Amino acid sequence: MTEPISPQYDPAQIEAPLYRRWVTAGLFEARRPDQHPAGPSYVIQMPPPNVTAVLHMGHGLTYSIQDVIIRFERMRGRETLWLPGTDHAGIATQNVVERLLAKEGQTRFDIGREAFVRRVWEFVRETGDTILDQLKAIGSSADWTRTYFTLDADLSRAVREAFVRLHERGLVYRGHYIINWCPRCLTALSNEEAEKEETDGKLWHLRYPFADGSGQLTVATTRPETMLGDTAVAVHPDDERYSHLIGKLIRLPLVEREIPIVADAAIDPSFGSGAVKVTPAHDPVDFEIGQRHELPTIDIMTPEARMAETVPARFQGLDRYEARKRVVAEFEQLGLLERVETHRHAVGHCYRCDTAVEPRLSDQWFVRMAPLAKPALEAYRSGALRFIPEHQGENYAQWMENIRDWCISRQLWWGHRIPVWYCEDPACGKASVSRTDLSACPECFGTVRQDEDVLDTWFSSWLVPFSSLGWPDQTPDLAAFYPGHTLVTAPEILFFWVARMVMAGLEFMGAVPFSLVYLHGTVRDTQHRKMSKSLGNGIDPLDVVTRYGADALRYTIVAGMSVGTDLLLDPVDLETSFAPARNFANKLWNAGRFILSNLDGPVRPLAGAHSNVVRREELALADRWIIARCDATVREATAAYDKLRFNEAASAIYHFLWSDLADWYIEQIKPRLYGDQPGGDVARAVAARTFEIAITLLHPIMPFVTEALWQRLPGRTDDRFLSRERWPTPDGRASDAAAVRSFELVQELVGAVRALRAEYGVEPGRNVRASVSGMSTAAEQAFRAEALTIRRLGKVTELGLNVPAEGIGASAVLSDGTSLFLPLGEILDVGKECARLGAEIERLKSLVSSQESKLSNQQFVSRAPAAVVEREREKLLSWREQVTVLSEKRQRLGCK
RNA sequence: GGGCGAAUAGCUCAGCUGGUUCAGAGCGCCUGCCUUACACGCAGGAUGUCGGGGGUUCGAAUCCCUCUUCGCCCACCA
């Protein structure tokens, strides 16, 4: 602790070494045998970043918040666990490695499944720790000894266990349905993974001729190319326009196939023409219509969304959009295109590559969600699961209520292979679901082959709250840390992950995995656009750490975002965003530097049974004031942290440290510290203690600078860390209302003197005399006690108490009616002073008159609480008093 | 189409249960200061019909209705 303390705080020198010391000392590790058992557990599951991820501001935001919470709870004495891990991120990771292969001119199909998976593992082993290392740079206090990867053997076992159990309960099934298909990633997606994007499309009105040549029927469609797979036209059964046509045959143009007109209640007669083409293989609604009417399904597309062999030769091989053009053109040629109108509608896009999703008919595995959603909804309704912001709970409930089955199979190679084996003997053909790998059919002992598909990444993620703790084994960690407490993430992840974790927790563990879900906002640029790679409007958090420090990054995030709002940062002007927090760290550093440099001897304690304890009667008014302010700040900050309102905690601490402690208290104690006044030891004791408390309160948000300062306080040893200190508790005896009010009057007086000086351009170096009169006894005592403070900070040579004003001067009146007079003599511009006083009197008079009418309002006096009425009366009296005082001043100056 | 939210200083936002933080903070702007902790600083200052309208109330930035403008989530109207 003996490094020189420079006047400018340099985070680069402090942060990294300090972080290493924290880790070496095991401060973030849960259930360390060498550490005293702490209180009840507090667990935050870190949303595992994708193993390929590189830290961006979104991570910076979410993990800073989580770290603030976990540090706060740790200091409060909870047995904390912030459990980190990485996600194998099926599609994302596979895409990354496929791109690497592409650079070598290869595809995954060239090298084959086994080699490809090996290749991905190599990639993951090389780069997989990147993001976790980056998290350390921003100060994350996660328990790295417990880091998991969602493809680890333990977690894979949990995945298999969960799959088998769901299957045993009949909640997993394989089915032939329309799913969302990404023609670029060549896999099925869940509904959540197909992100709806509003798109400007067109609505084509096509004429379908009747087979008997008796006319035509117009159908409207947004996807004309799918007509090649139409197997019916549907109308609403009650639609009188078409009821006579039901059963009639259409001769499908271009393909010359005859298809029936059917009646189905799913059709909305008011949309388009009221007649709909039915393509069971390429639209979910049409699929259902097809089932109801036993229509054939014609799959017209390849996995890449090109036209398949099932369509006329001239269309085969065309991309779906090319095919669309071609179909429309041919309809036009045939005179069968009635009209085209623009039409805005939502189209699903792959959440990984943004390709428009193709509804595709295929065999997939699904989880039946309704039975799982029921208890998950109940948990919310009963209050076992809460949300911040609260209204997000309704979002959750709405999703649960409308839940649809979850397609969990993916046609990828990177992931948990589906634990199902099919008997290759066609006579048997049994599908076996198994916890262990099968080499033979349990039914006929024939050869088996495992399902080729892997599971949705989120199928491992939803188990994380317990799989990361050892489930299905009953491990000590599982017993100690399930269920957890708070889950912090972005609202986008609510359905992907949060909602599903609740369902899995209830299903497999019988308890919600966390009781509070905190959904924070998004990082955006100054134009409110999401930060993204493609827009190039991102900010690299590590760049911010390098230039401003991790503390500044964290403070900016935490202080700049209140519950439910987004964080706006300017990517081209980091200075505007991060300098204020950097300046704050520097301010702290310098306040600490000042206090520390004055702590030469032993520091007397403020409380306790020590012989040298500072006694109450030794405290100056300023001491009592700062102690009371400090105590109030402890209360405010603790309450704010507790409610996850970090911006409020931050601003309370900021205000205390900067405005109260640095601007006033440190200025106040200088004469005592320099030996010009007695009581230096008391000032030192109070300054050291209140500063220590304040940096303790700030530590969860700015862990580095506060730890560095704390460790430099006297009596610290290398093995003690602020990170493991106990949270300050408010001390009722410290809230000294009288001292606070008195010192505030002193502040007000100094402020009034300064304002008058500035108003009349009194040179900064010039001392003036001041006199005050008309104050209460309490105020007089305060001014007498703090006379030196008033003189020093107001640059007042002589402070007259209750001395009558003499000569020409500037006047002001304090809120309690105290009259201030600065005899400025020739400096004073009498005309200006008259005008100033006049304006002030007018302002007060208008307050007085509105206050008078308020108080003469019988309704107000009788209905408002007595305390409120009393306060209002006092205000009125005070304002009247101030008017009187100022009017006298004006008279004395001889104002007209 | 269903659900939810937001509008307060030039900018970003606080303001929680209607009245003692009630019109605030930071940034920006103006004036003056290198006062031996800090110019990443100190002191002083200007700036608002609290989106419009209506209502409830003794009292509304705060509660209710309505309009306007933005945003988010969900959704199979082809």
Image: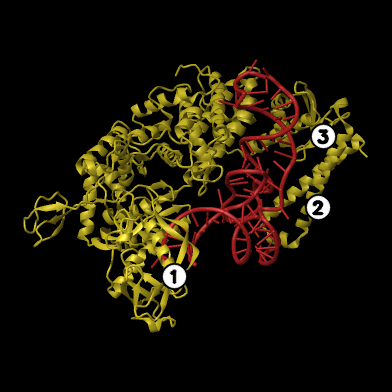
- Chain shown red: that is B
**Disc 2 marks which residue?**
A849
How far apart marks 2 and 1 lie (CA) works out to 83 Å
Quadrant occupied by the N terminus of chain A: top left
Residue farthest to the front?
Answer: A333
Q: Which color is chain A depicted in?
A: yellow
Of callouts 2 and 3, the N-terminal one: 3
Q: Is residue A708 visible?
A: yes
Per the image, label 2 sits on a secondary structure element best described as helix
Q: Is residue A346 left or right of residue A306?
A: right
As helix, strand or loop, the secondary structure at mark 1 comes to: loop
Please report the residue visible at 41 percent of the width from the left and 26 percent of the height from the top.
Answer: A16
Residue A114 x/y as whole percent: 19, 42
Relative depth, front residue between B69 and A321: A321
Q: Earlier in the sequence, mark 3 or mark 1?
A: 1
Separation of residues labelled 2 and 3 (CA atoms)? 23 Å
